[in-house]
Image (tube, rainbow, N blue to C red):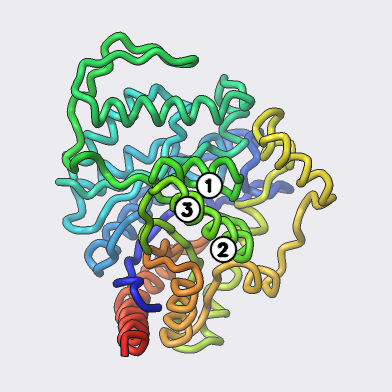
Amino acid sequence: MAGLGAPQFYLMHFMPYPDVVPNRPQGQWVDIPNTHFDPKVGYKLYKEYIDELVLGDKLGFDGLVVNEHHATFYSLMPSCQLIASALAVLTERAKICVMGTPIGLTYPHRLAEEYAMLDVMSGGRLECAFPLGTGMEYWVNPLSPATARERFREGMDILMQAWTKPGPSRYDGDFYQYKYLNCFPLPYQKPHPKIYVVGSGTEDTVNYAAERGYGYSQVFTPIPAQLKSFENYRAVAAKHNQPTDSESIIISAMVFVAESEEKAIEEGRDHILFYFKNLLKTDSHLNSPPGYLPVERLRKRLESGVTELDVTWEGLTTVYRTALGTPDHVAERIAFWCEQAQSTKIILHLHVGDMPHWKAVKNITLFAEEVIPRVRKLMSSSVQVAAE
């Protein structure tokens, strides 16, 4: 593990709406009637969710991650900027990572201004991760998914021009035209906040991030596929003379910490299974609307014949980064995953699925107080041994 550096721990919240819809899984179906939403329940959940993230700042997490999804039970965060702005005021030290608004589904200059505003409000604590957006986002927005990738790249060009080129400047593209591109305010950090691209392993997304010198994070794909993507990312970055380090790659894990392995399984396993069996599920046609996937990726998916995976606990713990157990066990797993991926930035999902607030607080607190020091000691010892 020589040369990796100190690990950084980011606390992430999906903000699900974990109520029960009769005879339907809650997840990412965009056609579940919104009459199932109870504003009084939502009020309580928002307060709990924000309290958990603020607790993470107080307990010493290096960063807080908020994301964005639309029109589903999967997330109560249709605007990650709103939650990030609350965190900018309520927290003092942790980085705030927006992971993030799909730039092709909004006006890029507006997003550049909003993110710059957050960076200034937080005193330079903002980090930005840009997703293409899930297939469901394109069912509930009036844009063709066939143009998603081109819009994404053009939007990123506009954002970078708005942040780095003195304005007003002009931009003439295929989807956006600006006579006066004049970001006001500008970001606190110079030349701009740290940027990542979030993907699921599509080759052109990995290559794009590497060629541009952005960081990369891959979500909800098996570990071997992620490691292959990370290897390709570093190779492409080197080919284009883009420097990479242990912060260029973000990995994530679902974790529950308790006094014993039995207690951790008892208190945490069902919530992780709920997340994968219910909140993460959707129909294939919603997940991949026509034109959303590159042709080659779609061909491989169809040739595989796989339509839906049977979620079992054994399967999850084999192919995904899930760890339930004592602080020692969890720390050892995280240190191994960091070394395996050559990454020092790890996102922790410590409120998972339908987990109640008291369990999330317990999990966040135990992780901060018992696991973080152990991981730092393990990784520090590994560096010292390797250097001898």
Q: How many marks?
A: 3
Q: Amino acid at mark 3?
A: Ser
Closer to the camera in the image, 316 or 2: 2
Marks 3, 2: nearer the viewer: 2
Q: Amino acid at mark 1?
A: Val
* Secondary structure beneath label 1: helix
Q: CA distance from mark 3 to mark 1?
A: 9 Å
Judge left or right: residue 29 versus residue 356: right
Residue 353 appears in view: no
Q: Residue at x 71, y 47 (%)?
A: 24
* Secondary structure beneath label 2: helix
Please say if 207 is above or below 380: above
Q: CA distance from mark 3 to mark 2?
A: 11 Å
Q: Could you say where residue 236 lies in the image, as x and y percent from the top left?
A: 50, 50
Q: Which residue is mark 3?
A: 217
Q: Which residue is mark 1?
A: 206
Q: Quadrant of the N terminus?
A: bottom left
Judge left or right: residue 223 versus residue 181: right
Check contact, mark 3 vs mark 1: CB within 8 A. no
Q: Could you say where residue 299 lies in the image, as x and y percent from the top left?
A: 78, 40
Badge 3 or badge 1: first in the primary sequence: 1
Badge 2 or badge 1: first in the primary sequence: 1
Q: Amino acid at mark 2?
A: Leu
Q: Quadrant of the C terminus?
A: bottom left
Closer to the camera in the image, 299 or 58: 299
Q: Could you say where residue 285 lies in the image, as x and y percent from the top left?
A: 74, 36
Q: Residue at x 62, y 52 (%)?
A: 280
Location of residue 99 (image quadrant): top left
Closer to the camera in the image, 8 or 282: 8
Q: Which residue is mark 2?
A: 227
Q: CA distance from mark 2 to mark 1?
A: 12 Å
